[in-house]
């Protein structure tokens, strides 16, 4: 990342070993970003998790984002840990402490630092020759690792643990907490723990004896993480599905969704084997996504709570079946862990680019109920709720997560045990059929909500059966090509979708009475957006309202929210503003109020980008150069009225390379 | 053509089966296929087999893909749930349904286009998994519903009505199923209903996937001079592998053959399949023999019919998954939601 913004910063002098970096000035406590550059496959993931967890255990809110290549070994990988006392855990662009371990990227890693940043580097990389306005800490990792083990493979792994010790000593992470984190990381296995602890100590010792001390950024114990858990969204979704009574799971491996079903397999083996050693579930690795979704829908048809997980390319392959599922009214849940497209795009980068795809997937008039979690807590909740909605509405239900949420580690309150029973929807039993004297119609809208009753195969009643086919049927499920029968079918399906507006997860709205500006966001953009609202308020005194969308179809308060604000910024992580366009269709006349802020680099959205884009669009200040990554709609900028600005600084432009 | 079936038992057909149901209880809707279509002959034998085997129709689920063949589940067993899926991907729907409820007796009807072309991948993986399902391919070498294009099972040199000659070699779905480890592979002929019903009964008794490739002439698009899948040609080239008899578990075997002449295979439910050799002693449990025999017939331009491969002991997918006895679909919440302590433990581990 090239930093084009010129930050105001103190002038720096190249490090002198004897001198304390940042001496005299007050340290920034519990507010820093650590960026670690390593080579994929070198085992740095364990070290980075230990580093993140140690800070977490010191009570400091923390987030970890893994930026990894589509590769098993050899390509560059980065891990960013953000510790923030105020609980802001979105991605932050500015790096305060860099750890350079990768020769391939050392130059760009160093170039991307803001002046005054700290940079630990592996001695042969000679980073200190690259810049004079960064504080460098040279470490001969190979030499230190040589003291630890004879085994070259182990040495490589331990090298990464040494930098944990170095970082810990430099910023004040307590050794005791690192030991706890290591024990957790290596699941209490002494054989793995001992050499890693030795590596930590080696790092600490080296830093103590050879590196200058620094007092710019420190980590200090606080109590903001007590009782919290760390988990990724995919594992959270798996736990939610398990407690939501999922019984049939099918999947095909695809990044970034594989870990969802893999976690589910692990948990189910542990918690869903009955007293006789029998499984209360079936999990199948399918031959492709077409088969995976077919099995889900077949299982849903036969009455199982069924789900699959995939990513955008898999969703594309599921298109035909999902259309059948919509028309034939088959329950099933599809988790789409979004990534950058297409199949050979950037499979290990995050995006929110599948909104249009899932909203209308397939041919004919199709529209799908879609849940959009923002947090690991919501992944857990929707894990079960999506299964409920699929069965209640007898339709495929999507859950739109993304790589950032699904694969990165997030802090959360522990998940509450579900108090409510699961919902199984309208299923007629043999007894009910007897009461009805066998008179029922599979596609008859007897309740007026567009949702018909169904029976399951195997129901022991001579009138239970019906024949399932796409849309060529009447209300009694008899084959029909009559124009009116077809129209009745698709009109009822539209009505069913209308009913869903009342039952999908409702938005979370933060109304501010005096706000002229409203924000709409969804999914992981939430985290950057909340921080941006805080920036706008603190730095500019601008109050904003916020509507966090959690599902499709839209709920009725969306129109009201847009109506009550002068300008509504829809912030999302795709190029075209897919959700903003859907919102424009929904709100009719008020669509002129909708403005798009779009972040689409493959990296998670950050707060400053949003704040800068809002300020630009709200101000009349000419842009110094065109926006590269933050796409605003120029015609709307021109029409915008200036907003009140506190303080004397002008609007700035958020840029990335 | 020799008789394909063995005379076993009394041979009388009662007017009610052991469930007290009549044959009409197994009927379906009126067929909309062309008069004389081989597929209708197969539907009739499906009705007969399920009736005579006394399978409760409510326990059966019918599946199909797309094409003429795939319309037929509407024409038999109307008291069974049916599912007309998408082209070539009925195996996935059937797999899902059977995972949800392993007590379902599943029957899938596909065609040669549906299985050998668009659905080949799903077919092969269904075979690998040994899904407990009767999978019938109504094979006529032609796409009927789209009006007469060649399918992947059309024989080399076979001629379309328009005069177009097929240059590509046919896919032998029986050989493919044997290759992939299927435990029940048979070929039938819609023009031989007696053999067909015995194959179907054996398939109903089989716990696992049974692949039944049935040569089923298309009277409209592939029954002319020069076609190798028409009635006349098929009758002339039907080569019986053996004569087949089927004996239900409650029946006594009464066979008048010399020992060594017949081979008896016991099925899971206690029923027995009796195979009387017609040529060399053919052991249907040996895959390599099956493949050799199939290839030889192809080389000689013959259509080999019978139970080509049979290994009833192969474990079905649902038994491999070791699921609870009750169908997953109807498990109560106390079985599918782990207790509070389980979540507490998971949360503690994440702290």
Image (cartoon, coloured by chain):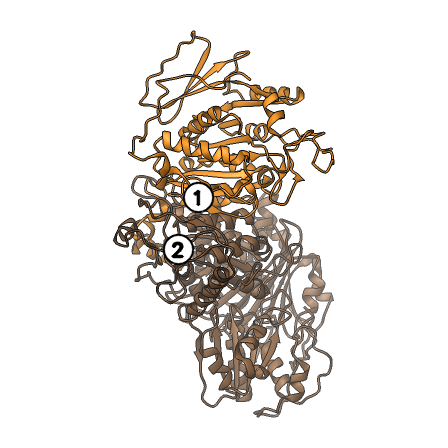
Chain colours: A brown, B orange
Q: Determine contact: label 2, label 1, CB under 8 Å.
A: no
Does A74 sit left or right of A521 as displayed?
right
How many neighbours does mark 2 have within 10 angstroms: few (below 14), some (14-19), or many (20 or more)?
many
Q: Tell me where residue B222 sits by quadrant.
A: top right
The residue drawn where x is 57% and y is 74% is A580
Q: Is residue A167 visible?
A: no
- Residue B193 location (% of width, % of height): 48, 27
The residue labelled by disc 1 is B29
Q: In the rendered view, would you say A593 is above or below A44?
A: below
On the question of residue B157 being in view, the answer is: yes
Question: Which chain letter goes with mark 2?
Answer: A
Badge 1: few (under 14), some or many (20 or more) residues near its Cα, within 10 Å? few
Which residue is at 68% across, 73% downward? Answer: A3
Where, quadrant-wise, is the N terminus of chain A in this rendering? bottom right
Q: Nearer the viewer, mark 2 or mark 1?
A: 1
Asked whether, in this view, residue B312 is left or right of residue A581, the answer is left
The image quadrant of residue A229 is bottom left
B132 up-or-down from B306: above or below: below
The image shows residue A648 at horizontal and vertical percentages of: 61, 92
The residue where tag 2 is placed is A442
């Amino acid at each position: 990342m090239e930093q084009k913004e010129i930050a105001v910063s103190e002038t720096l002098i190249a490090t002198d070993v004897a001198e304390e970096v940042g001496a005299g000035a007050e340290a920034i406590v519990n507010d820093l970003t650590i960026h670690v550059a390593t080579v994929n496959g070198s085992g740095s993931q364990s070290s980075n998790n230990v580093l993140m967890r140690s800070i977490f255990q010191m009570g400091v809110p923390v987030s970890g984002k893994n930026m990894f290549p589509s590769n098993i070994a050899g390509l560059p990988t980065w891990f960013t840990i953000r510790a923030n006392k105020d609980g802001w855990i979105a991605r932050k662009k500015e790096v305060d402490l860099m750890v350079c371990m990768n020769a391939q990227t050392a130059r760009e890693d160093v170039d991307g630092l803001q002046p005054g940043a700290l940079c630990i580097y592996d001695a042969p990389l000679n980073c200190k020759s690259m810049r004079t306005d960064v504080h460098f800490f040279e470490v001969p990792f190979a030499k230190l690792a040589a003291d630890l083990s004879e085994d070259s493979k182990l040495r490589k792994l331990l090298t990464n643990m040494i930098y944990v010790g170095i970082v810990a000593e430099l910023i004040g992470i307590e050794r005791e907490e690192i030991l706890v984190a290591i024990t957790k990381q290596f699941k209490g296995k002494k054989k793995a723990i001992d050499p890693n602890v030795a590596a930590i100590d080696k790092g600490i010792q080296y830093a103590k004896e050879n590196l200058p001390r620094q007092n710019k950024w420190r980590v200090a114990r606080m109590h903001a993480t007590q009782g919290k858990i760390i988990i990724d969204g995919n594992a959270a979704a798996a736990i939610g599905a398990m407690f939501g009574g999922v019984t049939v799971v099918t999947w095909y491996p695809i990044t970034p969704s594989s870990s969802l079903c893999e976690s589910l397999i692990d948990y189910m083996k542990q918690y869903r084997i009955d007293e006789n050693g029998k499984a209360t579930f079936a999990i199948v690795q399918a031959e492709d996504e077409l088969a995976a979704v077919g099995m889900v829908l077949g299982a849903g048809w036969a009455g199982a709570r069924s789900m699959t997980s995939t990513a955008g390319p898999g969703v594309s392959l599921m298109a035909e079946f999902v259309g059948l599922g919509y028309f034939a009214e088959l329950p099933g849940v599809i988790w789409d862990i979004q990534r950058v497209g297409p199949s050979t795009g950037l499979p290990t980068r995050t995006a929110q680019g599948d909104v249009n795809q899932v909203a209308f997937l397939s041919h004919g008039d199709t529209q799908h109920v879609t849940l959009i979690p923002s947090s690991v807590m919501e992944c857990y909740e929707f894990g079960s709720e999506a299964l409920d909605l699929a069965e209640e509405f007898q339709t495929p239900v999507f859950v739109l997560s993304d790589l950032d949420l699904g694969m990165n580690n997030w802090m959360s309150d522990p998940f509450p045990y579900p108090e409510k029973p699961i919902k199984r929807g309208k299923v007629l039993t043999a007894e009910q059929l007897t009461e009805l004297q066998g008179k029922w119609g599979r596609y008859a809208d007897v309740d007026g909500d567009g949702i018909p009753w169904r029976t399951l195969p195997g129901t022991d009643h001579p009138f239970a059966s019906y024949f399932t086919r796409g849309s060529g049927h009447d209300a009694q499920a008899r084959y029909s090509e009559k124009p009116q029968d077809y129209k009745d079918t698709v009109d009822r399906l539209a009505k069913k979708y209308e009913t869903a507006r009342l039952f999908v997860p409702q938005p979370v709205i933060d109304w501010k009475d005096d706000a002229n500006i409203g924000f709409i966001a969804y999914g992981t953009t939430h985290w950057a957006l909340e921080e941006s609202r805080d920036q706008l308020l603190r730095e500019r005194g601008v109050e904003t309202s916020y509507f966090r969308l959690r599902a499709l179809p839209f709920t009725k308060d969306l129109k009201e929210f847009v109506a009550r604000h002068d300008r509504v910024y829809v912030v999302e992580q795709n190029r075209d503003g897919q959700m903003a366009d859907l919102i424009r269709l929904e709100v009719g006349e008020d669509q002129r109020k909708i403005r798009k802020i779009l972040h689409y680099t493959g990296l998670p959205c950050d707060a400053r980008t949003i704040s800068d884009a809002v300020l630009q669009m709200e101000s009349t200040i000419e842009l110094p150069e065109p926006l590269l990554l933050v796409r605003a709609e120029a015609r709307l900028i021109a029409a915008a009225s200036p907003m009140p600005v506190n303080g004397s600084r002008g609007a700035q432009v958020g840029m990335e390379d | 053509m020799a008789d394909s079936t063995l005379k076993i038992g009394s041979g009388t057909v009662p007017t009610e089966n052991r469930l007290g149901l009549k044959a009409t209880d197994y009927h379906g809707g009126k067929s909309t296929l062309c008069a004389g279509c081989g597929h209708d002959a197969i539907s009739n034998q499906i009705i007969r087999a399920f009736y005579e085997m006394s399978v409760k129709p409510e326990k059966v689920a019918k599946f199909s893909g797309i094409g003429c063949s795939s319309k037929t589940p509407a024409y038999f067993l109307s008291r069974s749930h049916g599912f007309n899926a998408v082209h070539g991907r009925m195996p996935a729907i059937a797999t899902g349904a059977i995972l949800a409820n392993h007590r379902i007796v599943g029957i899938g009807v596909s065609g040669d286009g549906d299985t050998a072309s668009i659905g080949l991948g799903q077919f092969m993986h269904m075979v690998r998994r040994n899904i407990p399902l009767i999978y019938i391919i109504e094979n006529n070498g032609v796409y009927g519903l789209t009006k007469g294009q060649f399918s992947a099972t059309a024989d080399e040199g076979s001629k379309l009505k328009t005069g177009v000659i097929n240059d590509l070699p046919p896919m032998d779905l029986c050989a493919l199923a044997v290759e992939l480890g299927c435990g029940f592979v048979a070929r039938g002929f819609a023009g031989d209903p007696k053999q067909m019903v015995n194959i179907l009964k054996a398939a109903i008794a089989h716990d696992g996937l049974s692949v039944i490739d049935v040569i089923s002439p298309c009277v409209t698009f592939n029954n002319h001079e020069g076609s190798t899948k028409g009635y006349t040609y098929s009758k002339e080239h039907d080569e019986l592998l053996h004569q087949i008899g089927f004996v239900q578990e409650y029946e006594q075997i009464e066979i008048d053959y010399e020992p060594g002449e017949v081979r008896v295979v016991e099925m899971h439910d206690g029923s027995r399949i009796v195979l009387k050799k017609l040529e060399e002693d053919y052991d249907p449990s040996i895959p390599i023999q099956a493949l050799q025999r199939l290839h030889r017939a192809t080389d000689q331009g013959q259509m080999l019919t019978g139970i080509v491969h049979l290994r009833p002991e192969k474990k079905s997918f649902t038994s491999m998954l070791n699921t609870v006895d009750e169908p997953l679909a109807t498990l109560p919440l106390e079985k599918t939601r782990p207790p509070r302590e389980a979540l507490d433990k998971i949360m503690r581990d994440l702290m």
